[in-house]
Amino acid sequence: MAPGSGSKYFVGLPCPAAAGLIAATVHAIKTPIEDWRWSIVWMIVVMADAGLMSSTVRYRSFKDIPMVARQKSFLVIVMALLIWGIARYSEQC
């Protein structure tokens, strides 16, 4: 957390967000990377992800958003749509 700013900001990209970027990339690409040029591109993405985690860039934490009863039902709908989208566009095992 950013010193002196309460809990409004993170300093550096939080680990769950960085892991989500990598997991979403792995989930989205259906075929193995065979071309060495794409391997370099994804290595740069991973290194940029690691650099953002150790940087001093401030990211909003969204912990100061008030959660009232009305917003909780909206959050349930958003989460349901997110889960439906992941299930709908995922590969069958």
Image (cartoon, helix red, strand yellow):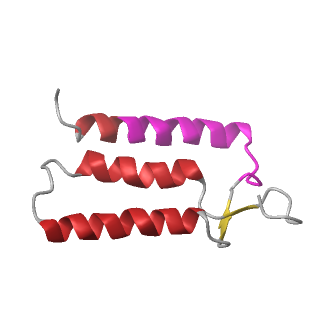
Of all residues, the one furthest to the top in this rendering is 93
The answer to if 70 sits in the magenta stretch is yes
Q: Quadrant of the N terminus?
A: bottom right
Whole-percent x, y for residue 13 in the image: 59, 61
The residue closer to the viewer here, 56 or 69, is 56
Whole-percent x, y for residue 8 in the image: 77, 60
Whole-percent x, y for residue 65 in the image: 73, 53
Of all residues, the one furthest to the right in this rendering is 4
The residue closer to the viewer here, 12 or 85, is 12
Q: Quadrant of the C terminus?
A: top left
**Image side of residue 77 versus residue 13, left or right:** left
Residue 6, picture quadrant: bottom right
Magenta extent: 63-83
Q: Is residue 44 above or below residue 84?
A: below
Residue drawn at point x = 14 percent, y = 50 percent? 32
Residue drawn at point x = 22 percent, y = 64 percent? 39
Whole-percent x, y for residue 14 in the image: 60, 55
**Image side of residue 17 versus residue 42, left or right:** right
Q: Is residue 40 above or below residue 20?
A: below
Residue 56, picture quadrant: bottom right
Residue drawn at point x = 47 percent, y = 63 percent? 49
Q: Main secondary structure of the magenta part?
A: helix
The answer to if 53 sits in the magenta stretch is no
The residue closer to the viewer here, 61 or 2, is 2
Q: How many marks?
A: 0
The residue closer to the viewer here, 22 or 69, is 22
Residue drawn at point x = 34 percent, y = 35 percent? 84
**Image side of residue 6 versus residue 58, left or right:** right
